[in-house]
Image (cartoon, helix red, strand yellow):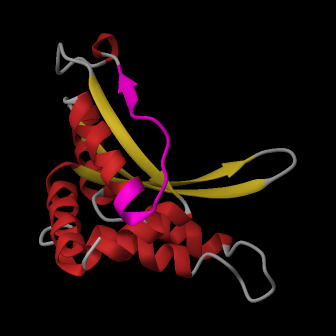
């Protein structure tokens, strides 16, 4: 793919992320391992559109992902339609964030957060920097507003 076509695709993906994208993270704990997950995702009511976006990202940018996930309307009180998501985790989320960050207009802080979190996740001794990761998780963009809204709603 030539540079102008790739720039157009990256701008398109960044614009879609600005409108329909989100990020997530968390600490997984278990008896045998502790791990951290990092996710960049797109949500949409149009399954075919997300499949085409996935194909563009895989074939033109070389970032593989899984299938488009279905979120049934049976569990969504706000809509009678199924919704769908396309997610990138870990290094794939980092690679995509690095590529679309220069083109984003509204959610540059979300993309920069993914980049900073991925780059700072290890201690010098090769172990997870759990304190940093927990701090990043607690302070990720969009989280404070959502947590404040939930607290206010539960107090009513």
Q: Residue at x 46, y 69 (%)?
A: 94
The quadrant of the picture occupied by the C terminus is top left
Image position, residue 5 (x, y; %): 19, 70
Image position, residue 36 (x, y; %): 63, 58
Image position, residue 97 (x, y; %): 36, 69
| Front in this rendered view, residue 136 or 126 | 126
Identify whether 52 is placed above or below 132.
above
The quadrant of the picture occupied by the N terminus is bottom left
Left of 118 or right of it: where is 75? Answer: left
Q: Was residue 66 drawn as part of the magenta stretch in this picture?
A: yes
Q: Residue at x 42, y 47 (%)?
A: 87
Left of 142 or right of it: where is 46? Answer: left
Q: Residue 16 falls in which quadrant of the image? A: bottom left
Q: Residue 15 falls in which quadrant of the image? A: bottom left
Identify whether 13 is placed above or below 102.
above
Residue placed furthest toward the bottom: 124
Q: Residue at x 22, y 45 (%)?
A: 149
Q: Was residue 154 drawn as part of the magenta stretch in this picture?
A: no
Image position, residue 47 (x, y; %): 26, 29
Q: Residue at x 28, y 33 (%)?
A: 154
| Front in this rendered view, residue 149 or 79 | 79
Q: Which residues are magenta?
A: 59-71
Left of 84 or right of it: where is 35? Answer: right
């Amino acid at each position: 793919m030539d540079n102008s076509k790739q720039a157009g695709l990256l701008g398109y993906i960044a614009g879609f992320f600005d409108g329909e994208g989100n990020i997530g993270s968390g600490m997984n704990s278990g008896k045998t391992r502790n791990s951290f997950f990092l996710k960049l995702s797109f949500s949409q009511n149009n399954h075919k559109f997300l499949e085409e976006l996935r194909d563009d990202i895989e074939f033109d940018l070389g970032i593989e992902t899984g299938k488009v996930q279905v979120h049934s309307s049976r569990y969504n009180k706000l809509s009678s339609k199924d919704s769908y998501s396309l997610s990138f985790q870990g290094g794939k989320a980092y690679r995509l964030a690095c590529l679309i960050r220069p083109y984003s207009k509204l959610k540059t802080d979300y993309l920069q957060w993914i980049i900073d979190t991925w780059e700072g996740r290890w201690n010098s001794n090769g172990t997870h920097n759990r304190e940093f990761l927990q701090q990043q998780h607690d302070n990720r963009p969009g989280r404070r507003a959502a947590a404040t809204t939930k607290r206010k709603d539960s107090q009513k």
